[in-house]
Image: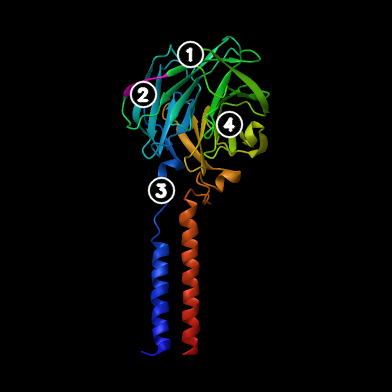
Amino acid sequence: MRRSSAVLAGLTGLAGMLLTGACALPASADSRAGDTGFTFKDPRITESSGLAASRLHPGVYWTHNDSGDGPYVYAVDSATGKTVARLTLRGIGSPRDVEAISIGPDDQIYLGDIGDNLGGKWPYVWIYRLPEPKVLKDETVTAAQYVVKYANGPRDAESLIVHPKTGRVYIIDKKEDGGHLYEGPATLSASGTNVFRPIAPVDLWATDAAFSPDGRQLAVRGYFGGIYYDWNGGRIKRAGQLDVPLQGQGEGVTYSVDGTKLLYSSEGVGSQVEAKDTPGPAAAKSPSGSVSRAGGSGGGGFRTGAVIAAAAAAALLGLWRLRRRG
């Protein structure tokens, strides 16, 4: 075989292998069909008032009902919409008006019993904390209970968020003309009163909120719209509007685990959870810091695929040039 023929054969084989490899790249582990939206199938979920994506169980979302249901939280498989676990909380009093759910950096579930429809009737509200189970099944779980008081008096609230890096708990009160972001103590105390203090205004009648997985973005939703903020160490800065879907009574929002989607829930039996692309910087980076596509695939695989495709193109170009010389 002549040298030119050998080179041609080598380039042909290389191009074929590279193209095959590019086409055969596996989908990112962060890509889950359920994260594009789902419908609650459990008839017990009648008033989903909060939503939180599980990190221990990718593709599972935690939710709870509004007042009147009892001390329960539900784990829902987003691929099917079916409940895969219902946790019953013990060690707490009777929940009054549970309005929010969030998961901290230590895989602890936080429930906000912070609703006050009369706008100031309750001098104290409560937060419950329980460990997220490693195995999903119906069970009773012991929870810690924290007494919460606002520095400037009682108020209604439906948004409780736990920072994914620091574990600090925040609350946003619910007022038609806009509320405030309240910061809790660095560590919650189960033996005393936890005073939450206002640190920044929020330009929305807030029904829920969520941190991006990297903690750099805060999304706040209302019934008819939403705003996202740069977190900026708690000195929040308005960054833009959210594409909030029109829902019957929209009261839940969470980021997907990979940070590329925002999922919105609503009250009602058989209600739908709708997904929208994440706006701003959170859409461009996954929690590990790698660039990702808007569709939710991990950035590493996309970047590797692009390199392979470029190498294949270069090999084919060389092959074409050699053939022209022949």
Tell me what residue is drawn at x 42 percent, y 68 percent: 19
In terms of secondary structure, where does tag 4 sit? strand
Q: What's the distance in space between the residues labelled 3 and 2, CA to CA?
A: 27 Å
In terms of secondary structure, where does tag 1 sit? loop
Q: Which of 144 and 136 is in front in this view?
A: 144
Neighbor class of circle 2 (other Cα within 10 Å; few <14, some 14-19, many 20+) is many
Q: Which is nearer the N-term, disc 4 or disc 1?
A: 1
In terms of secondary structure, where does tag 2 sit? strand
Q: Is residue 248 at least partly visible in the picture?
A: no
Which residues make up the magenta segment? 139-143
Mark 4 residue type? Arg
Q: Which is nearer the N-term, disc 3 or disc 2?
A: 3
The residue where tag 4 is placed is 221
Tell me what residue is drawn at x 47 percent, y 25 percent: 110
Neighbor class of circle 4 (other Cα within 10 Å; few <14, some 14-19, many 20+) is many
Q: What's the distance in space between the residues labelled 4 and 1, CA to CA?
A: 23 Å
Q: Which is nearer the N-term, disc 3 or disc 1?
A: 3
The residue where tag 2 is placed is 87
Work out whether 217 lies above or below 303. above
Mark 3 residue type? Ala
Q: Which is nearer the N-term, disc 2 or disc 1?
A: 2
Which x, y percent locates residue 324?
A: 49, 87
Q: Is residue 84 at least partly visible in the picture?
A: yes
Q: Nearer the viewer, residue 265 or 325?
A: 325
Q: Residue 96, which numbered label?
A: 1
Tell me what residue is drawn at x 47 percent, y 50 percent: 298
- From the viewer's perspective, is the residue at label 3 or at label 1 nearer? 3
